[in-house]
Image (cartoon, rainbow, N blue to C red):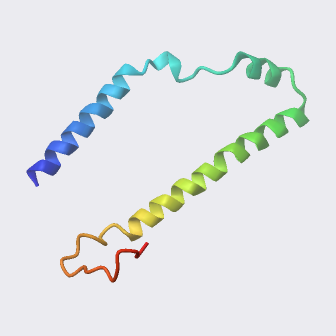
Amino acid sequence: MNILRQWRNVVLAFVALGILLVPAAALPQSCSLCYTQAASATQRFIQALRSGILILIIPPMFLSIGVMVMCYRKRNRFHQPDYAPESDNTW
């Protein structure tokens, strides 16, 4: 259990270091071309831009949710003491 605590502390230290090293000014940056195009666009173009954003966001979100569900279902598969695989090819 002590090893798990040490790993958790190491991971938390790296996350904290990563947060501190990322400059706050870099987060809200956007493409100036996109900004000017959206500012001078018609309603139809803005709707197309919103649809494009959704198309780019939704598939990775569903893939991430699928991986998390799969990991959640398989979380205790190898931690059970009576686990004995039927064969080596049980994927």
Please state the horizontal and vertical placement of residue 35, each as a whole percent of the image.
74, 20
Which residue sits at x=20%, y=82%? 82
Closest to the observer: 90 or 79? Answer: 90
Residue 83 location (% of width, % of height): 24, 79
Q: Quadrant of the C terminus?
A: bottom left
| Vertical side of 69 occupied by 53: above or below | above
Could you tell me which residue is drawn at 68 percent across and 20 percent down? 31
Residue 85, percent from left and from top:
30, 79
Q: Nearer the viewer, residue 64 or 83?
A: 83
Front residue of this view, candidates 84 and 71: 84
> Residue 38, image x and y in percent?
80, 25
User: On screen, 82 above or below 35?
Assistant: below
Which residue: 65% across, 45% down?
57
In this rendering, the answer to whether 77 lies above or below 32 is: below
Residue drawn at x 52%, y 54% as measured from the top left: 64
Quarter in which the N terminus is drawn:
bottom left
Instruction: Point out the residue furthest to the front here.
Output: 88
Q: How many marks?
A: 0
